[in-house]
Image (tube, grey):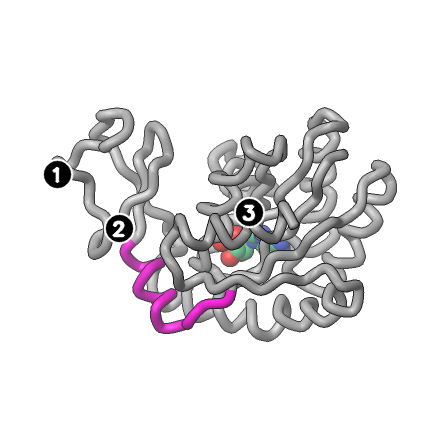
Amino acid sequence: MALEIIFLGPPGAGKGTQASKLEDAYNAVQLSTGDMLRAAVKEGSEVGKMAKEIMDAGKLFPDALMAQILGEYVDKLDAEKGIIFDGFPRTEPQAGLLDELLSQRGRSLDHVIELAVDEDALVDRITGRFTCANCGEGYHDRHKLPKTEGVCDVCGATEFKRRPDDNEETVRTRMAEYRAKTEPILPIYEARGLVSRVDGMASIEEVAASIRAILDA
Ligand code: AMP
């Protein structure tokens, strides 16, 4: 049976990191709506132009269009593949749209993992992060520099990139959006008995182990 999991947590909580770590073990695919929008920005499509403006401001992309784009990605997956939703839903309407999207495809939610974190620590995490432009390995100015300066530990590439929305001002807006619009969807899933809370401030390995324990229970 395909496993459908949502990772919920503010920007920088580690949703993307954990999702990509767990994909293989659970025969699941990470679907990040942020990555979908960044791909659209790169393509330079009309949707991409609109997405860039919204993302640079730290605001949220329109619900219905976001769900439609996500649906197109889900439709490309094999039915037996599970899905780890990273960054969706982010609003109450999106939670409803996700239920519809899944039920139309014979799927349903199994778990909502909430990554609980300290906000000031998040700003520190986000404003220092960067990735290898070639393999996507994550680094940090203060916590995880490449072993040899300017060279990726994993693939040896020398180009790195930073997200344009990872500056303090935008991060604060993204946090406020999370508190105002995303946090209120937790009770909906709590009422359905789907939510498990994990300490997102622990190390990457510890967080992954806690999530595995929940999924394997
Ligand atoms: P993320 O990579 O998840 O941090 O998302 C980066 C940005 O993309 C967010 O700050 C939003 O502007 C936009 N975005 C990503 N996912 C969604 C979503 N589910 N609904 C609305 N906007 C989104």
Q: Given the image, on which type of amino acid does mark 1 rest?
A: Glu
Give amino acid for label 3.
Arg
Q: Does the numbered disc 2 mark a residue whose Cβ is under 8 Å from ligand 1? A: no
Question: Which residue position is annotated with label 2?
Answer: 140
Residue at 30% from the left image edge and 64% from the top image edge: 124
Query: Viewer-nearest of labels 3 and 2?
Result: 3
- The residues colored magenta run 116-128
> Residue 47 location in percent, x, y?
61, 42
Asked if one can make out residue 50 in the rendered structure from this viewpoint, the answer is no
User: Residue tagged by mark 3?
Assistant: 212
Disc 3 from disc 2: Cα separation: 25 Å
- Rounded to the nearest angstrom, the CA distance separating label 3 from label 1 is 34 Å
Say which residue label 1 marks: 149
Residue 201 placed where, x, y %?
A: 40, 63
> Mark 3: few, some, or many residues within 10 Å (few <14, many ≥20)?
some
Q: Is residue 119 magenta?
A: yes
User: Quick check: is 184 in the magenta stretch?
Assistant: no
- Expressed as whole percent of the image width and height from the top left, the position of residue 92 reads 73, 65
Please identify, in this view, whether the residue under mark 3 or under mark 1 is nearer the observer.
3
Secondary structure found at label 2: strand
Instruction: Indicate the quadrant where residue 177 lies.
Output: bottom right
Looking at marks 3 and 1 on the same chain, the residue that comes earlier in the sequence is marked by 1
- Position of residue 104 relative to residue 169, above or below, is above
